[in-house]
Image: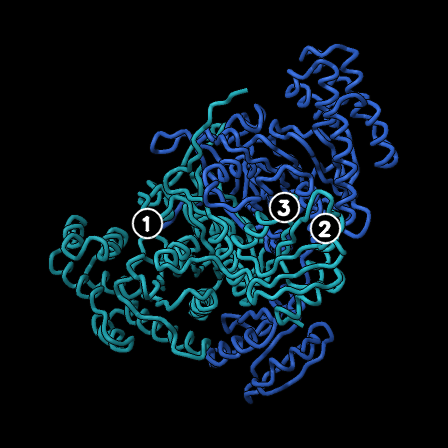
Chain colours: A blue, B cyan
Amino acid sequence: MKRTVITPRTLRGFVDVMPSTGRRRRQMLAVLEDVYTSFGFDPIQTPTVEYAEILKGKGGSESDKQMFEFEDKGGRQVALRFDLTVPLARFVAQHESELTFPFRGYNIGYVWRGDRPQRGRYREFLQADADIIGESGITADAEILTIIATALARMDIGPVTIRLNNRKILNGVLTRLGLQDRVAPVLRALDKVDKIGPGAVADELAGAGVSRAAAEDLLALIGSLQASNEASLSHVGASVAGSAEGEAGVAEVREVIGLVSAALGTPAPIRFDPSIVRGLDYYTGMVFETVHDEAPEAGSISGGGRYDDLASVYTTSRLPGVGVSIGVSRILSVLDGLGRLGDMPRDRTLVVLTQDPGSDRAELMRLAAAIRGGGPFDVELYPAAVKHASQMKYGDVRGARFLLTLDGDGTMSVKDMESGMRSSVPPAEVPGLLRKLIGSP
Amino acid sequence: MKRTVITPRTLRGFVDVMPSTGRRRRQMLAVLEDVYTSFGFDPIQTPTVEYAEILKGKGGSESDKQMFEFEDKGGRQVALRFDLTVPLARFVAQHESELTFPFRGYNIGYVWRGDRPQRGRYREFLQADADIIGESGITADAEILTIIATALARMDIGPVTIRLNNRKILNGVLTRLGLQDRVAPVLRALDKVDKIGPGAVADELAGAGVSRAAAEDLLALIGSLQASNEASLSHVGASVAGSAEGEAGVAEVREVIGLVSAALGTPAPIRFDPSIVRGLDYYTGMVFETVHDEAPEAGSISGGGRYDDLASVYTTSRLPGVGVSIGVSRILSVLDGLGRLGDMPRDRTLVVLTQDPGSDRAELMRLAAAIRGGGPFDVELYPAAVKHASQMKYGDVRGARFLLTLDGDGTMSVKDMESGMRSSVPPAEVPGLLRKLIGSP
């Protein structure tokens, strides 16, 4: 039967993860889970599809527009989640009686946004969130920031900077300027300063009814990054003097940086940056984004903040929260852009070659199992007795450290591709020999 | 501002994974990734959303009906994947030139089916697939079956049985009965025998144009399970005598069971079962399903088989494949049904209590970091100086093994909740003491 071939392709903004990227991704996810767990966070999962009503109107109109929304076969209006924070708020509200508070949970999963696809911005991407719910003090904020710094360092991606701000500072200034009823549109405009520049932001602020003088004050505030955190804090502190909320915001930032540095045992890679606003409407306190120092233009590789009212959409209980979202897909894309996404070494991989049609496959499978069981090895059994040269080439292309051949006399030939040395030993001695060659006890 | 509360709820068939289930799930996924990797499989990922055209018509009409399909905002007809096998076929066809064959890949992710939700059957569930592409010999089939047995044993879920059959046996019989042009509808009918019984299957076969005598032959064949694999193979061997394809199918099953037993070093938990058909249209050789021996009625916890023509939908290259899908959500549901899904022990969890408003939070964060860094501990810092009794209760409800308190004199009090013993030591000695108490070097 001759069939028409359907051209294999993916949707724009949806990408396949290839084996070498997949291996690096696995290493990153293992680090993230280890770090989250070591801070007492338990893994949870929420569905990828939820009632659209649950997801909409929490992140802001921009998120709503980008949502993958559709009617399911039962006539329900549903959507793919656009972040993991809104579903978490729904989760803690729904399961409040089953959870222990302060609740520490992490959730690793895909989110979907119908954004214009561009380098490093996908329509489907993987995020790894960690949140503390039910605690409003800044020790929780400091723990989240410590997690970010610890996890990114252990992921071995290069130097990063966490840019930190506090919405209380902005709120204090807005209140002083009489703009307390226009917080959301003003912050959304300010959030765009890196993208569209101060002139266009000023225009947008004017459109939101902000006077020219007030717009200048706001732009001066968010542009007031100084050489050191202490200098920036003093400078901004002067701008908010007299606003209790603004002064509290400055004090919190100062204290949190101190706590994180204490936990890390070294100055925290945090920069107080008054221009960090975060576009999402639900943040109420600390807001933070992380950039890779060698690719700041690639955008934030993690983001988060404090959202003390988000769960109030779903419950009358007070469930303040703070959390971070680490952008796994974005980090992989940044590393790719920096040329640092080569395949990881396969120094514990070995390929067992199949000699000829008469070779004893049961014996080879037994041997492969013994090597797997006896040490930290990934063992690939070449599954067919094709030409020896083809099998050797396979092992070479795979980058396997060892090639094994069962010889006619029943001994096993072990070739170490790193040293080029070849040894012949009885099969039972192979696991021990391999462990010796990789220097494992 | 008084807001209307939206009732927090999930869609039917879409479930939240709670912390204790999440911890067991994490353990299972770690085992699966370790086992897949130890057999030389690399992690890949395909998008959750694909062109509907790519996904439809490969699994069979039943799968098409159950697909979550919708039009995206760009007017494209798209769908959520209903399995990981069809996307894999698209993946290898699309990236053929970038992959090394035989290609071993694994993919862990959600799939969606608009099935009628019932116990253990969700509309969104997690699968962990492993496939070998580009090899048609049965060593690859034996490797996949060895992986299933190894992974399920290491996941520690209790005894399982892999039910194995070969489509070649059924094809041989169908050819002998002159039904070679009605394979798909006949197999779909036979696949339902467990659900609807032989009478209803006979009716469906009659509707597909199968004579009454042929239907009886087929039902006798798939009902011919004997006390031992060898007895079943002999019995079925007699039914297919004279059909080259049927005889080859029987010989393959016999040989594969021998290879897997050799690899495992013990008789493989495989039962040759002529009633295993698998509903999906794309299988061409071995087909297998696994049941939990204590809950066979819960359905299969893994399934798979050989599909030598699937990629031909997307490419003219010949890319035969064999693979397995391990149903992680299904396994969790089976364990839940068996009452075996309690929380895992927290024998390395400790809670650091916060004494009073004046306690040195920086000191506590430093100490928590030191304990995390110095040993295999999950350290929860209680983030607020609430009443001591409330913090003790938190530690108790969490099931933490140790509670730590920084005393006024600067020493640390360590309470071992297992033995009830309390020790007071300088903070610097805490990591060492904890390691001693859990018996770690």
- Percent coordinates x, y for residue A73 in the rendering: 35, 33
**Closer to the eye: label 1 or 3:** 1
- Percent coordinates x, y for residue B295 in the rendering: 31, 61
Q: Is residue A380 above or below residue A360?
A: above
Q: Which mark is residue B365?
A: 2
Chain of the residue under label 2: B
Name which residue lies at 67% across and 55% down.
Answer: B405
Read off the residue under disc 1: B119
Q: Which mark is residue A328?
A: 3
- Percent coordinates x, y for residue B233 in the rendering: 27, 74
Q: Are marks 1 and 3 on the same chain?
A: no
Comes first in the chain, label 1 or label 2:
1
Name which residue lies at 46% across and 42% down.
Answer: A97
The three-letter code of the residue at mark 1 reads Arg
- Would you say residue A313 is visible in this rendering? yes
| SS for callout 1 | loop
- Would you say residue A24 is visible in this rendering? no
| SS for callout 3 | helix
The three-letter code of the residue at mark 2 reads Met
Along the line of sight, the residue nearer the viewer: A334 or A164: A164
Position of residue A266 in the picture relative to residue A196 (left or right) = right
**Closer to the eye: label 3 or 2:** 2
The three-letter code of the residue at mark 3 reads Val
Position of residue B376 in the picture relative to residue A268 (left or right) = left
| SS for callout 2 | helix
Q: CA distance from mark 1 to mark 2?
A: 44 Å
Which quadrant of the figure has residue B260? Answer: bottom left
